[in-house]
Image: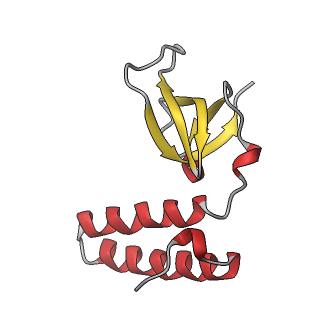
Amino acid sequence: MEKRYSEYTVEELRDEVAKLKEKAQKAEQMGNVSEYAIYERKVQMAMAYMLNPEEFNSGEVYEIEEDPGHTFRINYINGVFAWGHRLNLLGQSLEKEEAVPLSVLGKRKS
């Protein structure tokens, strides 16, 4: 049975990320878009476990990596996920609450 990312050491997580990035690159070269997307999501999850959730704060707004049209306002943190709302360029909240891995959040907005 495989270990969960929460049971990995930081070194094991780094190794896993490297392996997943290599697999994603191969999938991209082969033109397998869906397989590439799966590996990229796994990379995001593994990287989320290398972050300290205490460095992210409820009520704060963060950039979203690879989505320059939106920011993310955190309502609360649960494990390695931030729950909250995407905001458009005007700062308007999109309707539904969602969870994103902490690893997809970028710089905190002032």
Give the colour scheme shown: secondary structure
Quadrant where the N terminus sits is bottom left
Image position, residue 42 (x, y; %): 44, 66
From where the camera sits, is residue 52 visible?
yes
Is 106 in front, or is 25? 106
Residue at screen point 45% across, 80% down:
22
Residue at screen point 50% across, 61% down:
45
Indicate left or right for 27 with 4 as reference: left
Is residue 58 positioned above or below 33 on the image? above
Image position, residue 8 (x, y; %): 61, 77
Residue at screen point 25% across, 64% down:
33
Is 10 in front, or is 66? 10
Image position, residue 16 (x, y; %): 54, 79
Indicate left or right for 107 with 8 as reference: right
Residue at screen point 32% across, 71% down:
28
Q: Give the quadrant of residue 36.
A: bottom left
Q: Residue furthest front?
A: 1
Q: Give the quadrant of residue 27.
A: bottom left
Quadrant where the C terminus sits is top right
Image position, residue 90 (x, y; %): 52, 13
Indicate left or right for 110 with 8 as reference: right
From where the camera sits, is residue 66 visible?
no
Is residue 57 positioned above or below 5 on the image? above
